[in-house]
Image (cartoon, rainbow, N blue to C red):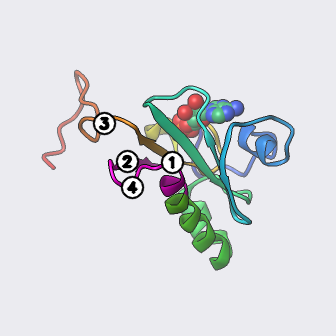
Amino acid sequence: MSVKATEPYDEGNIFARILRGEVPCRKVHETAHALAFHDINPQAPVHVLVIPKGPYVSMADFTANAPAELVAGFFRAVGETARVLGLEETGYRILANAGPHSHQEVPHLHVHIFGGAPLGPMLARRAGSRETGA
Ligand code: AMP
């Protein structure tokens, strides 16, 4: 199910429950501002999620409403997580879904880090997709 980026924060979402310690995760890295853990359904040899420690649905919500210290700490933690994973040399991809067109499933801001193998083109082309000319 996709979520609207504009909907109110749902305290019962799975990542809120992970942050509260109610649901386990395979932790990769943790700071005062962020938690990084392995995706339960990996789409690449390395697939890790980084989430901020605060109730934000999307990147727009987070950057508009979170304190500057949390925004900086979160982005720092994303970079640190890529380093902890040993992906600096081979490279990696960062992706954040927001709202229905992106297929965001969990309504707590999360950044995906993919790596561990060549990842192919940035967006998969599918039959019937609209060409943007970009
Ligand atoms: P998105 O479509 O960007 O909202 O991605 C949500 C991601 O969360 C998916 O890649 C799921 O596999 C992942 N996910 C859902 N539940 C869990 C969980 N309990 N632990 C780790 N990853 C999860």
Neighbor class of circle 3 (other Cα within 10 Å; few <14, some 14-19, many 20+) is some
Question: Which mark is in front, 2 or 4?
Answer: 4
Give the magenta part as a residue range: 81-97
| Mark-to-mark CA distance, 2 and 3 | 8 Å
In this orientation, which residue lies closer to the viewer: 132 or 50? 50
Neighbor class of circle 1 (other Cα within 10 Å; few <14, some 14-19, many 20+) is some
| Mark-to-mark CA distance, 1 and 2 | 10 Å
Determine which residue is flagged by label 1.
Answer: 85
Give the mark nearest the N terminus, 2 or 3. 2
Determine which residue is flagged by label 2.
Answer: 92
Neighbor class of circle 4 (other Cα within 10 Å; few <14, some 14-19, many 20+) is few
Give the mark nearest the N terminus, 4 or 3. 4
- Amino acid identity at mark 4: Glu
- Amino acid identity at mark 1: Leu
Determine which residue is flagged by label 3.
Answer: 119
Q: Eyeballing the image, is 6 above or below 44?
A: below
Per the image, label 1 sits on a secondary structure element best described as loop
Marking on residue 88 = 4
Snapshot quadrant of residue 58: bottom right
